[in-house]
């Protein structure tokens, strides 16, 4: 059984925000909405102060609380482990937002008229027009790229056209994507080395996104 997941090596991450920009460009998310984001923190004191950068996205949990909280069945987990939102079923109640312990979900506000009177740029306006309003959205692991690639016989995590945009854009080569259930995949091998950890694993959500930590970046999240 295929279960897609991601491993992020924080020791390779150069804090360039390339993943954030690539996600926004690929998915045209509107003003103020970032399916991929990052949390920054500091530790220590001068001259030994350090900054920590923790990339964040939907964790595509094996036991997703957002799915359990959704009253309409709009939030669901596919057989390949990707958690999706059916916009036709979503009523915008925001129950899933409250249930998600990772802050990965965003409500698409209803904006009448869009454009200049709302202070939006052309790109931001285009983002709104590409998205359904009054629903909840989130990272999908660039499901459109995965489905396109599979139809072409490509392998997600290996072939760029079938791989999430944030992974392709990472200049530090800190992100890895693939099938967690395939022992030959890079992500499965990294997890098997027992250095990769899950955020808030104590909650029992079993995220499909893992981090190879550096210093206290993950433990402080």
Image (spheres, rainbow, N blue to C red):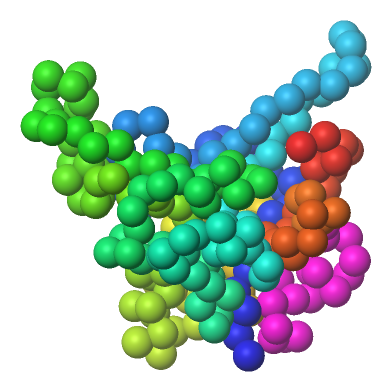
Position of 210 relative to 215 (above/below): below
Q: Residue 125's image quarter?
A: top left
Image check: 181 left or right of 151? right
Residue 91 shows in the view = yes
Percent x, y of residue 49: 85, 17
Frontmost residue, 88 versus 120: 88
Frontmost residue, 51 versus 127: 127
The N terminus lies in which quarter of the figure? bottom right
Position of 66 relative to 93 (above/below): below
Query: Is residue 187 within the magenta segment?
Result: yes
Image check: 28 left or right of 200? left
Percent x, y of residue 12: 72, 47
Image check: 185 left or right of 141? right
Q: Residue 109's image quarter?
A: top left
For image coordinates 64% across by 32% down, the residue present is: 39
The C terminus lies in which quarter of the figure? top right
Report the magenta residues as a range. Answer: 180-197
Position of 188 relative to 49 (above/below): below
The residue most toward the front is: 71
For image coordinates 88% across by 70% down, the residue present is: 193
Frontmost residue, 26 versus 93: 93
Frontmost residue, 147 versus 134: 134
For image coordinates 18% across by 22% down, the residue present is: 118
Query: Is residue 91 within the magenta segment?
Result: no
């Amino acid at each position: 059984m295929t279960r897609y997941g991601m491993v992020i090596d924080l020791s390779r991450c150069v804090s360039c925000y390339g993943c954030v920009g690539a996600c926004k460009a690929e998915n045209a998310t509107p003003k103020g909405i970032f399916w991929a984001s990052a949390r920054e923190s500091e530790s220590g004191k001068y001259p030994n102060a350090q900054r920590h950068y923790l990339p964040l996205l939907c964790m595509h949990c094996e036991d997703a609380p957002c799915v359990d909280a959704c009253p309409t069945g709009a939030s669901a987990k596919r057989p390949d482990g990707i958690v999706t939102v059916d916009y036709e079923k979503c009523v915008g109640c925001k129950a899933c937002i409250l249930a998600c312990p990772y802050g990965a979900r965003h409500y698409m506000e209803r904006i009448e008229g869009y454009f200049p009177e709302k202070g939006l740029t052309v790109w931001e306006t285009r983002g709104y027009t590409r998205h359904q309003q009054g629903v909840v959205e989130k990272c999908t692991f660039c499901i459109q790229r995965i489905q396109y690639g599979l139809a072409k016989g490509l392998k997600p995590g290996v072939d760029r056209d079938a791989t999430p945009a944030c992974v392709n854009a990472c200049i530090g080569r800190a992100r890895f994507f693939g099938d967690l259930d395939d022992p030959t995949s890079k992500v499965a091998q990294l997890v098997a080395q027992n250095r990769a950890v899950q955020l808030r694993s104590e909650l029992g959500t079993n995220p499909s996104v893992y981090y190879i930590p550096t210093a206290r970046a993950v433990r402080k999240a």
